[in-house]
Amino acid sequence: MSFGPLGVLALCVYVVAMVLVAFRARRARRDRTPADHFLAGRGLGVFVLFLTLYATAYSGNSLLGYPGEAYRRGFSWVMSTGFMMSIVVVFHLLAPKLRPIAIQHAFLTPGDWLRHRFGRERHGRGVLVACAALMTWALANFLLAQLTAMGHVTHAVTGGIAPFWAGVIGLAGLILFYETLGGMRAVAWTDAAQGLMMLVGLAALLVWLLAEAGGLEATSRAVASLRPEAVSVPDFREKANWLSTIALLGLASVVYPQAIQRIYAARSGRDLARAFAAMSFMPLATTTVVFLIGIAAIPRLVGLGGVEADTVMPRILAHWAAEGPGSSALAILVFLGALAAIMSTADSVLLSLSSIVAVDLLDRPRERPETTRLGKRLAVGVMLGAVVLALAPRLTLWRLIELKMELLIQCVPAFLIAIHWSRLRAGPTLLGIGLGTLLAGGAALAGMDRIEGVHVGVIGLALNTLVAVGGSWGAAPPAGQGPSGEGSRRSP
Amino acid sequence: MTRRLLLLGVVLLFAASIPWYREPEAPVAIWLGLPDWVTVALGCYGAAAVLNALAWLATEVRDPDPPGEPGAARRSGDEGPS
């Protein structure tokens, strides 16, 4: 049923490898400045940049939440390939314009853009604090989802030798250790190794699953006979939800703080563009594979529902391990790949979160080593809080993702519109963020997550944009501002 | 211009990936091992991935001088020390 002691041994080897990488990253440290700790000295080349973008984007949600959602919803979950790809598409609107400004003004956090763009306006600080607060919420939520996923994987594949709580607490401790020791450099290097493991492991798992089921067609027919609704063409509401999810994920993910900080951390603009070009294919190589794993689980694991469906992947891995020593070894590789994906996202999230709280919310000086130390202490505090919440999971992993995206997406006008339209003013932008957040958050609290298939966060963004653009329309740009809004703002 | 055309193609492929063209009660055939509308969606995403990658390769991301380092602005492709 499980890897048992072999799984525990593999876990120990993985932990030791991560510790060694952390020490190596610490030795590569150039100085103790926040730029070196949080952005790896702005020296990430195309290969490491690509793998760290990949490992950060494909997380515990992708590997546990997405198969669970494919299992629950059926073939309409092919939308996951689309919305993961939309992220790389929407970055066209932000990265080419943000990168030169960020390098010129030595940005450290996403909030530095807001300081630069709105800093001289009366409500500029308000826009910064509002966006930093939304990002902090989203990151804390994301971290919680990763910790929950870590607990599920550890428990299932060790057959209870390492219980859920031990997986959450032990691996959270490991992340804290290597992150405080090596900063972004340790995170990026571990991400690179973790990304490779994830790719190999997933491919092996899909081949086994399809071979077991007699091929893709046999799997589709088995699903059709067991659950015909999982194969049928989606109704209008599901199609609207498909489009809304592409918009929600595509737009919200470009204001993910950890993704923005990788734009700053790239060694060159060309490396950044090449990394994004390679990222275009990763939804096909990862999300589609994970989607098919969830579909293949429908005839194999009958009757899982709600939060329980999030355990589809560990259960499949346990079945695979029972086939014999060869499949057990490959299943361990998938297990480590899944765990690696979860941890690589959690560590990036934690690093971004601590930098945003230290620099944007608490307004500490960005060039001082004390800010780095404060960021490390904040990381410990946030991780402790997230561990406590993760020990009592009540929501599905997919719902956790949606909750954070619906609020994070309210930051979009302050980034995407502000970088292209110089007339956007801080006051209406702040009002738009407030109203959009109230609408999306209020509806979510009232138990309303979608209206006719459209996410309340997307509806909130429409209101938010209307207010921000309508309120700024006709207003002259503040003195000294260039046509793209990147003129002589106060640099961070 | 080429980049914009490529991105327009990506947007159109995204729109075409959603089975607006099919009624929910329509019979489903299996194509290439998957329900037909799923195969169409994945085909659209495959083509979109190619166009999007080409668009990124056609994108110039400038690298100006960092603060305190005046001189000729680095363009994308002129890599600095790692």
Image (tube, coloured by chain):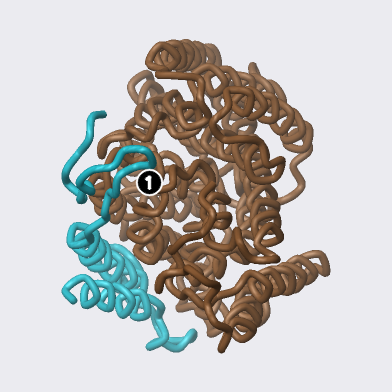
Q: Residue A49 appears in which quarter of the rendering?
A: top left
Secondary structure at badge 1 equals helix
Instruction: Give how far across and how far down residue A139 sits, in percent.
Output: 63, 46
Tell which residue pokes out farthest to the right in this image: A446
Q: What letter labels the chain drawn in cyan?
A: B
Q: Is residue A145 visible?
A: no
Q: Is residue A134 visible?
A: yes
Instruction: Give how far across and how far down residue A94 sits, in percent.
Output: 40, 61
| The N terminus of chain A: image quadrant | top right
Amino acid type, mark 1: Ile
Report crowding for label 1: few under 14, some 14 to 19, many 20 or more residues within 10 A (C-alpha): many
| Vertical relation: A361 (above or below) A119 | above
Instruction: Give how far across and how far down residue A51 sits, in percent.
Output: 34, 38
Q: Residue A152 appears in which quarter of the rendering?
A: top right
Q: Residue at x 71, y 40 (%)?
A: A362
A359 vs A36, left or right, is right
Q: Residue at x 53, y 41 (%)?
A: A60
Mark count: 1
Q: Between A216 and A385, which is closer to the camera in this rendering?
A: A385
Q: Residue at x 23, y 61 (%)?
A: B59
Q: Residue at x 50, y 44 (%)?
A: A258
| Vertical relation: A444 (above or below) A18 | below
Q: Between A182 and A401, which is closer to the camera in this rendering?
A: A182
Chain A display color: brown
Which residue has dot 1 on it? Answer: A103
Q: Between A293 and A482, which is closer to the camera in this rendering?
A: A482
| Vertical relation: A86 (above or below) A213 | below
What chain does mark 1 sit on? A
| Vertical relation: A419 (above or below) A296 | below
A73 vs A259, left or right, is right
Q: Residue A177 appears in which quarter of the rendering?
A: top right
Instruction: Give how far across and how far down residue A149 sits, in percent.
Output: 60, 37
